[in-house]
Image (cartoon, rainbow, N blue to C red):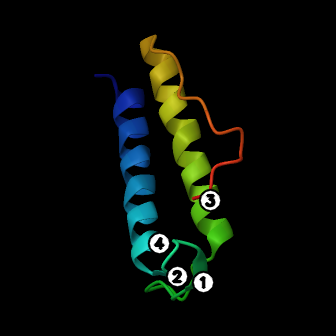
Amino acid sequence: MDAKSKTLDSIINMYKSQLRKFERLSVRDDDGNFLFGKNTEFGTTVTEALIENTHKRLMQLMNQKLHGSGIKPIANYTNGKAKS
């Protein structure tokens, strides 16, 4: 594994960790709909947009890693119509 790949793995792991933290700080109703988010240790309020954008960036980075390894990228099979 080269330095570039290790760096990308490190960044991917950071995004995964952030996403788990944001989900823990989210309050959802019984149907899973986002109601509100609490604050992180740095005072950032977790919002649905923050979670969505973090997830989107994580998928971009994972696709970048897969593309470099010759594996077909992850696609969004929901066409944006799936309820999260």
- Mark closer to the observer (2, 1): 2
How dense is the environment of label 2, judged by Cα within 10 Å: few (below 14), some, or many (20 and up)?
few
- Asked if the residue at tag 2 contacts the one at tag 4, i.e. Cβ–Cβ closer than 8 Å, the answer is no
Q: Name the residue under label 1.
A: 35
Q: 8 above or below 45?
A: above
Q: 72 above or below 52?
A: above
Residue at 52 percent across and 46 percent down: it is 58
How dense is the environment of label 4, judged by Cα within 10 Å: few (below 14), some, or many (20 and up)?
many
Q: Residue 45 carries which label?
A: none
Residue type at mark 2 is Asp
- Mark closer to the observer (4, 2): 2
Residue 77 point in image, percent of width and height:
61, 33
Residue 76 point in image, percent of width and height:
62, 35
Q: Residue 22 carries which label?
A: 4
Q: Disc 2 on helix, strand or loop?
A: loop
Residue type at mark 4 is Phe
C-alpha distance separating marks 1 and 4: 13 Å
- Asked if the residue at tag 1 contacts the one at tag 2, i.e. Cβ–Cβ closer than 8 Å, the answer is yes
Q: Which mark is residue 29?
A: 2
Circle nearer the N terminus (1, 4): 4
Task: Choose top left, top right, bottom left or bottom right for residue 71.
Answer: top left
Residue at 37 percent across and 60 percent down: it is 17
Q: 7 above or below 48?
A: above
Q: Which mark is residue 52?
A: 3
Circle nearer the N terminus (4, 3): 4
Check the image and name the residue furthest to the left: 1
Location of the N terminus by quadrant is: top left
Residue type at mark 1 is Leu
Q: Disc 4 on helix, strand or loop?
A: helix
